[in-house]
Amino acid sequence: MQEAVNKALAEAVRETVMEARENSVFTSKGRMFLDANASAYGAAVNAEGQLIDASGKVMDEKHPDYQTIINMAKRQARAQSSIGRDLLGS
């Protein structure tokens, strides 16, 4: 019975947890995903959480790599973050 309840709860909150994981890339809890993906593109993340290109300039949303870095970081956080693991079991 308890297992069925846990499974139903996990299914009910799965998408909310996944969205929280994605959005965590802009927080200290998920920043490692943003850092890793920025690094893969020769960029970095400053103390304010802004993406910095190889020349040291802050990237804006129009920079060709900006959305790619953000999307890859969100995808990685969705798959690997520990947020909600106790609810989802994974």
Image (cartoon, rainbow, N blue to C red):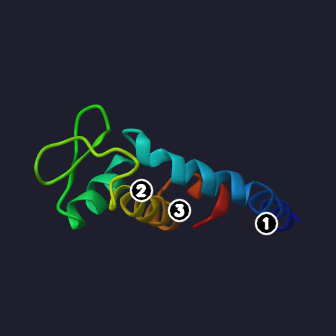
Residue 4 x/y as whole percent: 85, 67
Q: Is residue 72 left or right of residue 47?
A: right
Precedes in sequence: disc 2 or disc 1: 1
In the rendered structure, the answer to whether residue 52 lies left or right of residue 79 reads: left
Nearest to the observer: residue 66 or residue 76: 66
Marks 2 and 1: which is nearer the front?
2
Instruction: Residue 78: give x, y in percent of width and height.
Output: 53, 62
Is label 2 in a helix, a strand or a loop? helix
Instruction: Give the amino acid type for the residue marked by disc 1 in the picture.
Output: Lys
- What's under tag 2, amino acid-wise? Ile
Q: In whole angstroms, how far apart are the C-alphas of marks 3 and 2?
A: 12 Å
Q: Residue at x 53, y 54 (%)?
A: 22
Q: Mark 3 highlights which residue?
A: 78
Return the residue found at the far left: 55
Q: Are marks 2 and 1 in contact (CB under 8 Å)?
A: no
> Which badge, 1 or 3, comes first in the chain's sequence?
1
